[in-house]
Amino acid sequence: MPPTSPTATIRVLFALLPHSLVLDWAGPAEALRIANQRLQAMGQSARFVLTFTSPSPQQTASVGVQLHGLAPLPPTQQLQAGGENWVVLVGQPDSGPGTQDPDGLALVDWLRGLRLQTGRLELITICAGALLAAHAGLLDGRRATTHHQYLQALAAAAPGCEVLSNRVFVSDGPLHSSAGVTAGLDLMLERIAQGCGPVLAAQVAQTMVVALRRGPHDPELSPFLQHRNHLHAALHRVQDAISQQPAADWNASTMAGLAHTSPRHLARLFATHAGIAPLDYLRHIRLATAQAALQAGANVTQAALQAGFSSDTQLRRAWQRLGWCGTPSQARPQANKAR
């Protein structure tokens, strides 16, 4: 799904406690930094403003590094007042929820004042960070996950929460929880995709040399992210260009030109690394673009032109050929309300 407000700033607060796991917060923070960097390289404004906050101005991280100058926990009224805010809670090694020390108790007490709201104030938990949210009563009536080591503890701390096991991450409204460490990076890539679009998320993943993935029971990846789980720079360059301009006059030669190779060799590269033919990839992206246009209220003819199809008939044929459910007309919100 395309971002609803691509220029709005998102304030991201990483709440840190004594011995917070470095990988839980550093990996997601780097993903956001790279996202800002890529946006600025495209002439756009940075989207994410990162703040590292704590009940105390300094903490010792899990690997012993000293963190100084941490911002105080802001008044919760500021987070509710306006704009979009994400609060990120992370785990601590072998120490459970971290509520046995004064800083942990202070953080939980602060969390109790949060009123989560999609698009306004959202909570991201990584590893045992979910336990902090549970002790603050923020998981009641929601679905969540955590590291397998803490699943039983999470169920006990939040009996009103549906605790899911064997999940990389789970999103439920304004609550987003992950299994831990590298799963936190998976979750942050998904949040970048939701906030800034899947093409940018794919670029961040490529820069960080990580795979884009979801939990075993989560919805299928967006077509903009499918066939991107490879490290071939030339293919990513072609896929980026197609995703950014699906309506351009693409053919095998123009794609091959971007990769600085021949059309035949490009086809071999796509088959080997992306598992799909170049023109089939183009059709998938154009269909996804048309679907987004239809869901935004465009009619079938308008959606076909925006996506690069020569006519609504060509769009309908591609829709049927690739086995997409229903028809383009039924993808429009008005059609869904009428049924």
Image (cartoon, helix red, strand yellow):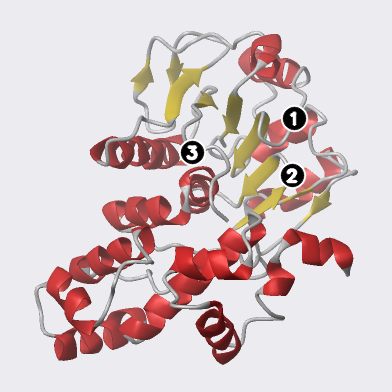
Distance from the alpha carbon under mark 2 to that under mark 1: 9 Å
Distance from the alpha carbon under mark 1 to that under mark 3: 21 Å
**62 with respect to 145 (left or right):** left
* Residue ID for mark 2: 173
As helix, strand or loop, the secondary structure at mark 3 comes to loop
- Which residue type does callout 1 highlight? Leu
* Mark sitting earlier along the chain (3/2): 3
* Mark sitting earlier along the chain (1/3): 3
**Residue sitting at x 62%, y 39%:** 125
- The x and y percentages for residue 175 are 70, 41
**Residue sitting at x 35%, y 35%:** 36
Q: Is residue 164 visible?
A: yes
* Residue ID for mark 3: 6
Distance from the alpha carbon under mark 3 to that under mark 2: 19 Å
- Which residue type does callout 2 highlight? Gly
Q: Is residue 220 visible?
A: no
